[in-house]
Image (cartoon, rainbow, N blue to C red):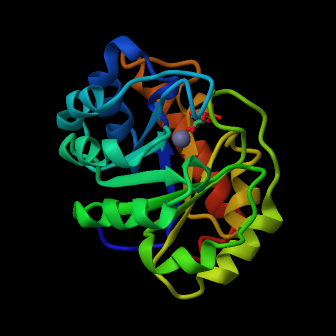
Amino acid sequence: MTFSRAIKIAPSILAADFANFGAECRTVEAQGADWIHVDVMDGHFVPNITFGPATCAAIRPHVRGVMDVHLMIAPVDPYIAAFADAGADIITAHIEAGPHIHRTLQAIRATGKKAGLALNPGTGLDGVEHLLDLVDLICVMTVNPGFGGQSFIDLSSKVRALRALIGDRPIHIEIDGGITPQTAPIMARAGADVLVAGSAVFKGGSADTPDVYGQNIRTIRHAAETAIGHLV
Ligand code: DX5
Ligand code: ZN
């Protein structure tokens, strides 16, 4: 994984066909997805349950590029090794998931994986500066986590402040929730480089109609890149 601030589109398989994850991942990658975003929910940290490390391991052979695993679980630490063994490239934990996020990020890094830090919409940047040396990605949630298909919350000022805080450090800014061709430009202009999109990528298509996914991905990417004048 070489670091770049170029816009990356990361389809969230939360909006894919759960009975067909392998084909869905292969199809969106073939249609231009940069990363595959995998939403793990525990019914405790968030009010919804998806799947765990066994499903991530099953998906892994179908993902050629980056598998970006977003853990919406608490506690996190007992499960880090399992998600690392499942083949995650990036493991992201929430700052709100427990009292010891610093330790959690250290533990993720210790597995040799990239470490991500996710922030709920109601969480500020206090404390983030003390974690910058431990993270490869910061995920700004623009919906309250738990469900796909929710309305985008415009947190431009938070993203801009985060972009300034990061400076020249090789840390990705990922936006997760409500990303569409209308909202992607707002976040790209604010400084995001990874755009997670579930509904907006998978809507109207299936693994049998790959062109739909391709068009959806191109439309989001084009909107974001146009907004920043392709300057990355
Ligand atoms: C929300 C998840 C998101 C979600 C995004 O808890 O973390 O990744 O799937 O879905 P859309 O793009 O439909 O808002
Ligand atoms: Zn997510």
Q: Is residue 114 above or below residue 213?
A: below
Quadrant housing residue 197: top right
Q: Where residue 95 appears, x then y in whole percent?
A: 58, 56
Front-most of residues 171 and 8: 171
Q: Is residue 224 depicted above or below 55 in this figure?
A: below
Quarter of the figure with the C terminus: bottom right
Quadrant of the image where one finds ligand 2: top right
**What residue sits 72% from the left and 66% below the top?**
159
For this view, does 138 lie left or right of residue 26? right
Horizontal side, residue 66 vs residue 64: left or right: right
In the depicted structure, whether residue 230 falls above or below residue 37: below
Q: Is residue 67 left or right of residue 212?
A: left
Q: Position of residue 154 (x, y in %)?
A: 82, 52
Q: Residue at x 50, y 19 (%)?
A: 205
Residue 186's x, y, as percent? Answer: 77, 58
Front residue of 64 and 225: 64
In which quadrant of the rendered image does the N terminus lie?
A: bottom left
Image point (46%, 60%), residue name: 116
